[in-house]
Image: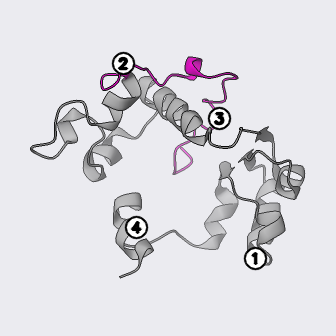
Amino acid sequence: MGNTAAATPYTYGTAASGSSLDTLLETKLVILWGHNPTETIFGHTNYFFQKMKQNGTRFIVVDPRYSDTVASLADQWIPLLPTTDNALMDAMMYVIISENLHDRAFIERYAIGFDEGSMPEGVPANESLVAYLTGAKDGVVKSPRVGGKDHSRAGANHSPTGA
């Protein structure tokens, strides 16, 4: 079994991966994180990205370089310094969780380790994602105020289903 087959049920909540390419045209937001498809992927991916852009899909590109992808697709470019990706991810998760923008039912059904109530038996206290983000584990709240410019709301009000 490959990595994708093993991880897909834990990532998407089902063994089936993805959906049809036609559903991409209904996407409201795409975050390309360290991904430069304009220069590295040819064919149908860029065709669909251009169609999505024409249909009003918003693109956020997180990349230290001003790439061809930033120039051709980005509505917002976040030029992070190398190795600061995790701080932005933490801040985004903090906002999503603290403002109740996450899909609670999905998390309760499919996630292990989200909060203390979903931890497997025998795991020490304060090892959940929520404990980490709120600083219960190390005393450091992973809020957007920890770093510099606040990009943490980039995409926070979009669900995977576009609702």
The foreground one among 102 and 67 is: 67
Q: Is residue 137 magenta?
A: yes
Pointer 4 or 1: first along the chain: 4
Q: Residue at x 83, y 56 (%)?
A: 69
Identity, as a three-letter code, of the amino acid under mark 2? Gly
Q: Is residue 134 magenta?
A: no
Identify the image quadrant of residue 146: top right
Label 3 element class = loop
Label 4 Cα crowd, 10 Å radius (few <14 / some 14-19 / many 20+): some
Q: Residue at x 27, y 43 (%)?
A: 113
Identity, as a three-letter code, of the amino acid under mark 4? Thr
Label 2 element class = loop
Disc sitting over residue 8 in the figure: 4
Pointer 4 or 2: first along the chain: 4
Identity, as a three-letter code, of the amino acid under mark 1? His
Identify the image quadrant of residue 156: top right
**In this figure, which colouring scheme has been used for the structure?**
one colour
Q: Which residue corresponds to mark 3?
A: 154
Disc sitting over residue 44 in the figure: 1
Label 4 element class = helix
| Residue 43 percent across, percent down from the top left | 79, 78
Pointer 2 or 3: first along the chain: 2
Cα–Cα gap, marks 3 and 4: 25 Å
| Range of magenta residues | 135-163
Label 3 Cα crowd, 10 Å radius (few <14 / some 14-19 / many 20+): some
Disc sitting over residue 139 in the figure: 2
| Residue 27 percent across, percent down from the top left | 65, 54
Q: Nearer the viewer, mark 4 or mark 2?
A: 2
